[in-house]
Image: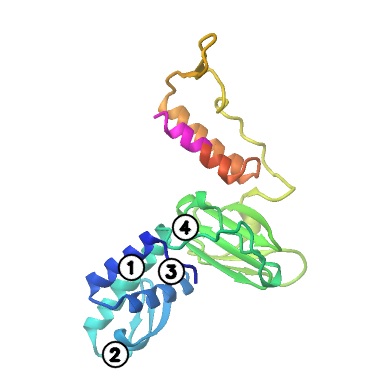
Amino acid sequence: MKTLTKEGQQKIDDIASRYELGKDSVFAMLKAVINGNATMAQFNIPELGGSGQWMKGGMTMVGDMFNRTLKITVDQLCTELAQLVSTEILFEEPTEQTIESKNGISGKPWPTVFGNPTSSGSQNNFRYAYFGPVHRLVIEQNGNRAIYDTKHHQISGVSQQQGSGQSYLLTSQDGPVDISSLPLISEPGNLTQETPGLAYDVVKSQGWNEKENASKPILAPISEDSIFSTIEKLSGLFEKGHITEEEYKAKKAELLARL
């Protein structure tokens, strides 16, 4: 498991203090929740009754089966940790941009512009990450990535279908969903949508007024709606691979500074 960030460690320490538990116990439960894609956890933690199981919105089982107080504690702890890993970045990103691993799967981090994955997993030579808040699913096959719009679906799992080709079956709150039914936002070498035009050139547009012989441009006011609209379109350019994540972040920061 990756190393906790300073902020992530502080959050774990705070949770351990509130629940009056050891930090190692809380961290062990955090790993169990992550392994269960934030929807379940199987654990063996002495301080929490030994072996047990938690399911989101379902039954909680602990070694001391008649200890109702312990069951409530485990349920509340797991629910809080599941929410935390789904909304916060708790671990440090790899220092290298790409780290090759087994079976042709790269160790390249998921796009941070989407936030923290709501659920993720790997199987054979592919892996996936679902980002619930932005309705995006990233599929990586042999190091190549495709981005899908998940629409209203809440993805809890992705599996490869048997047979020829590269087809995937998704698990959502509506049951099995064939990935072909989702809009494909970006695929390496095969863009399926036109690149959206920017509302204005981020570098120089009607929002820039330059005085003659001035060494620096003077920024004219731009409406808040125009700024957010342009950020959204920049996100589309990033998803389609026309700009890098670093370029997206730099231009976004430049625009937000003008609010």
Residue type highlighted by circle 2: Met
Dividing the picture into quadrants, the one containing residue 159 is bottom right
Mark 2 or mark 1, which has the lower sequence index? 1
**Mark 1, secondary structure of its residue:** helix
List the residue tagged with mark 1.
12
State the quadrant of the C terminus.
top left
Mark 1 or mark 3, which has the lower sequence index? 1
List the residue tagged with mark 3.
38
On residue 116, which mark appears?
4
Q: Residue 244 location in percent, x, y?
A: 61, 44
Tell me if label 2 and label 3 are in contact, CB under 8 Å: no
Q: Residue 239 location in percent, x, y?
A: 60, 46
**Residue at position x 42%, y 32% from top?**
257
Mark 2 or mark 4, which has the lower sequence index? 2
**Mark 2, secondary structure of its residue:** loop
List the residue tagged with mark 2.
65
CA gap, disc 2 to disc 3? Answer: 23 Å
CA gap, disc 4 to disc 3? Answer: 12 Å
Q: Is residue 66 magenta?
A: no
**Residue at position x 38%, y 61% from top?**
6
Residue range highlighted in magenta: 251-259
1 vs 3, front mark: 1
